[in-house]
Amino acid sequence: MWERRTIAMFFLNGAPGVGPRCRGRTILRLCNGLSTGRSTSSKLKSVKLLEVLNALEEEKSHSREEIFIAPPKNAAGDFTDEDSGDEDGQRGTHVPGNVLHAFVVPEDSGTAEEEEDDLQLQPATKKRKAVVEPQRVWTKRDIRPDFSSWTATDPHMEDLKSQELSPVGLFELFFDEGTINFIVNETNRYARHKNVNLGLTAQELKCVLGILILSGYISYPRRRMFWETSPDSHHHLVADAIRRDRFELIFSYLHFADNNELDESDRFAKVRPLIVRMNYNFRKHAPLEEFYSFGESMCEYFGHRGSKQLPAGKPVRLGYKIWCGTTSRGYLVWFEPSQGTLFTKPDRGLDLGGSMVVKFVDALQTRGCLPYHIFFDKVFTSVKLMSILRKKGVKATGTVREYRTERCPLKDPKELKKMKRGSFDYKVDESEEIIVCRWHDSSVVNICSNAVGIEPVGLTSHHSGAAKMQTQVHQPSLLRLYQEKVGGVGRMDQNIAKYKVKIRGMKWYSSFIGYVIDAALNNAWQLHRICCHDAQVDLLAFRRYVACVYLESNADTSSQGRRSRRLETESRFDMIGHWIIHQDKRTRCALCHSQTNTRCEKCQKGVHAKCFRAYHIR
């Protein structure tokens, strides 16, 4: 059985520290300076991230390690804008020394308690008096929810279908004119603050976005290879669109907030305006659906080059943890980067994860207080959370840890394991109609819901390894619905991981910007699948289309030392009104680049008769 361990990394005065919360005896021994088995209440010993990583390498268990990073405490400081180079050339385990030699400090997880085998390291805190809550009365019966049925329609989606937007038009629903102009203004403001007359325009910014998108499916070890004249690396689409030094200059000054108006209590203040704008646009154009998923996503900090691969298939990924709410198909509706409980205080008696679910629900309800149904896993689920969501008129279903069931008297897991597969036990809270069910399949699963009950009990296929055959086992209704609808965040992660932006700098928020671009492209593609039934393209073709249009459009602007080119727009592929005509002056063919005396009348591009059809087909 694979288990996931999470280590939370925090920057302290410009250098990162790590807050471990794990089951591994090796890590516990490092952090306590004690032999295995001694009390965890002893005084902690400072260790470095490098020691933790080496300990993980030496450990033999087959587990996956994740290290999530929070920005610097003083993320509002000017030093966090300094670009100390790029990530080109970083290989394998070559993580920056200031990260590897940072001291480990424990992080307050914010949870009330953990599983019995979870060893939790926390700084000494003043004990608070526990709030005594009334005990729930559990009864053996099915749930009787009183939510209204889903009858909502989505006029906005019908409007998008009628517009027949191209991939670029869909992408610009999120990176709209207001967002582009905002980034241009903040970037130029920051450059002036550094005594640089940048003069960035919206067209140039789109060109930079096009190169970032293109790097997701065409990747070089060094980004400057796009402009090299060497035949094995030169990329004419990029080289013709923008000069290398101009791209480097713009990329180094990209900025997303006014440094004079930063909230010092917000670690993501440097990108907070962009987060607010993107959340608004994502929510505004989201398909109005009944079922949503909530979970954790990971934005890798060092990308594939900086991740540290451990033996025995145990990768350690360094990156930002992001709370995400998606539709069941993977459209990102709302996101919030994690800052840890030291900087984000949970409310309503919930832990941090439960508080984030409530924030997502509040964002959903800005479109109307409808009976949405949210699915999440045991990291977030508790009976208290189900009660809060029920009062908001929101349905919820999720797997749950036993200690969060508020003493629901179900059959002991050991006893249930002795029964045949498909056996289950359940109880319902009398006052709030919240059901907790324990089901035995390949393992014992606890699941909780405020909207779905046991009936109708269905059958599901189970592969029997011993008998080498498929068997049918009973499955309660809430488990079947949970398995069908919970995977939205995973689908989004899968789409982003396929062709994610590879170009990034060493600013702490550089990789996060790539994540936002990838999320916007994923959302635009999801809308394309809904709106364009007759001319659907896959995700790769969708990204290529957006990148090519942005780069080809910028190649037409005149610049010093370069002849001007006529504008080529998305109409190149519309198959309407393209005619081949003779031209007096020979030019290069837009497809094969040899000389030709014919051109396309609509595109105003030189093109051979033999290349004409291929040039106008994607």
Image (cartoon, rainbow, N blue to C red):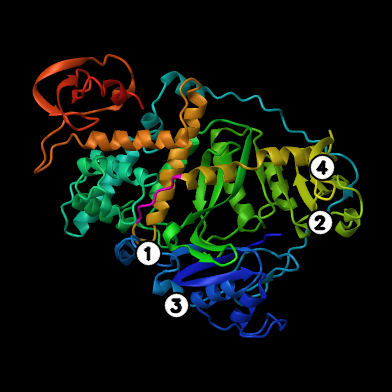
Q: Hey, which quadrant is residue 195 in on the image?
A: bottom left
- The span shown in magenta is 499-504
Report how far apart the C-alphas of labels 4 and 2 lie in the structure.
48 Å
Q: Secondary structure at mark 1?
A: loop
Q: Tell me the residue at 83%/57% (across/down).
A: 407
Q: Nearer the viewer, mark 4 or mark 2?
A: 4
Disc 1 from disc 4: Cα separation: 48 Å
Q: Earlier in the sequence, mark 1 or mark 3?
A: 1
Residue highlighted by disc 1: 90
Quickly name the residue at label 3. Answer: 101
Alpha carbon distance from label 3 to label 4:
52 Å
Query: Rounded to the nearest whole Å, what is the CA distance between mark 2 and mark 3?
Result: 48 Å
Question: Residue 397 in the image: x percent, y percent?
Answer: 71, 43
Residue bearing mark 4: 469
Q: Residue at x 48, y 20 (%)?
A: 534
Q: Between disc 3 and disc 4, whose residue precedes?
A: 3
Residue type at mark 3?
Answer: His
Mark 2 lies on residue: 134
Residue 139 % position (x, y): 90, 46
Residue 246 pos. (x, y %):
19, 50
Residue depth check, mark 1 versus mark 3: number of the one nearer the observer: 1
Frontmost residue, 572 versus 464: 464
